[in-house]
Amino acid sequence: MLVAVVLIVIAVGTVVFHVVSPWWWTPIASNWHSIDDATLVTFWITGIAYVAVILFMAYCAVRFRYRKGRRAAYEPENKRLEWGLTGLTSLGVIGLLTPGLIAWNEFVTVPDDAAEFEVVGRQWQWSFRLPGKDGVLGASDPRLVGGDNTFGLDPNDPRGQDDVLIEGDDLHLPLGRPLKVLMRSVDVIHDFYVPHFRAKMDIIPGMVTHFWFTPTRTGTFDILCAELCGLGHHTMRGMVVVEEETEYRDWLQGQSTFAELMARAAPGDAVKLATNDGREDAAANGGARSASNRPHPLNR
């Protein structure tokens, strides 16, 4: 009897703790409510199964407890029980998989009007690339990655000359616009994860993975790596700033393009891609780069 009471207390205590728990998701800041819904369905189904199994164990501990003179009935096959368990298990698996598959299909089906930007992962830092006025990201090749070209961009590709490069600084994005995220790694497996966006995906060396989202709230949100990528994994963090269109345009005008960075780099020197350097150079040049007021596909 004591075992049954302990089991019931565990089941009830777990449910109560879940309901009153101070730990919950971060406030959502993108359009992916369907991912939250799929997670809630998973909680409900696994929670019901968990409580049912615990209560069944408590019932068995009482109903079939030892009594002198009683013997267990040997029943190796019970078709009715087997079909019942198979049916319930199948319904549970369908209920778990269906919402997730629907959400995943939406997650990787990019709208035609989505603007692109690229995330590059390397130990242990996030870098970002935005297309220039031509609206197209230039070609890249892992074989071109080096101290003078940390993004591995093809210097002979005219489409990449106006690409905006962000390294060692925050990523800014406009509010309310669908965005396609292209991801690649130049060393090991990383995982681009923004909890507020409910967005995460592995980044595999040699591949370009993608998903899309629409920022729905202004603010500053953490970028994490959700894949153990080495000793410095815990330091691989960044920030994404979602802001109104006007503020975003002001930020964008202060960034450097690939051609500008290559032109400023002395032969043999490492190309400085940090946006802080870009701002300093712009100030030194009397804001000449800002005065160019170049258009941008994310700045339409």
Image (cartoon, rainbow, N blue to C red):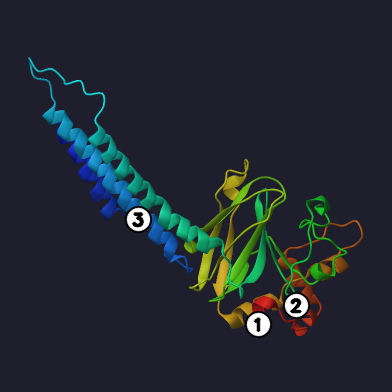
Crowd tier of the residue under label 2, counting other residues whose Cα lies within 10 Å: few below 14, some 14–19, many 20 or above: some
In the rendered image, the vertical position of residue 286 relative to residue 58, given as above or below? below
Is residue 23 at all visible to an observer of this figure?
Answer: no
Q: Which mark is residue 133?
A: 2
Q: Which residue is nearer to you in this view: 134 or 187? A: 134
Q: Which residue is mark 1?
A: 300
Q: Secondary structure at mark 1?
A: loop
Residue 23 location in percent, x, y?
Answer: 35, 54
What residue type is disc 2 on?
Lys
What residue is shown at x 78% (from left), y 51% (from top)?
142
Q: Is residue 233 left or right of residue 10?
A: right
The quarter of the rendered structure image containing the C terminus is bottom right
Q: Is residue 274 left or right of residue 243?
A: right
Q: Hey, which quadrant is residue 152 in on the image?
A: bottom right
What residue type is disc 3 on?
Val
Q: Is residue 102 left or right of residue 23?
A: right
In the rendered image, the vertical position of residue 50 relative to residue 286, given as above or below? above
Residue 74 location in percent, x, y?
Answer: 20, 20
Q: Given contact means CB atoms under 8 Å apart, are the residues at marks 1 and 2 in contact?
A: no
Crowd tier of the residue under label 1, counting other residues whose Cα lies within 10 Å: few below 14, some 14–19, many 20 or above: few
Mark 3 to mark 1: distance in Å?
A: 38 Å
What residue is shown at x 47% (from left), y 60% (from top)?
103
Q: Which residue is mark 3?
A: 41
Mark 3 to mark 2: distance in Å?
A: 43 Å
Q: Which residue is nearer to you in this view: 165 or 107? A: 107
In the rendered image, the vertical position of residue 230 relative to residue 152, given as above or below? above
Q: Given contact means CB atoms under 8 Å apart, are the residues at marks 3 and 1 in contact?
A: no
- Give the farthest residue toward the right: 267
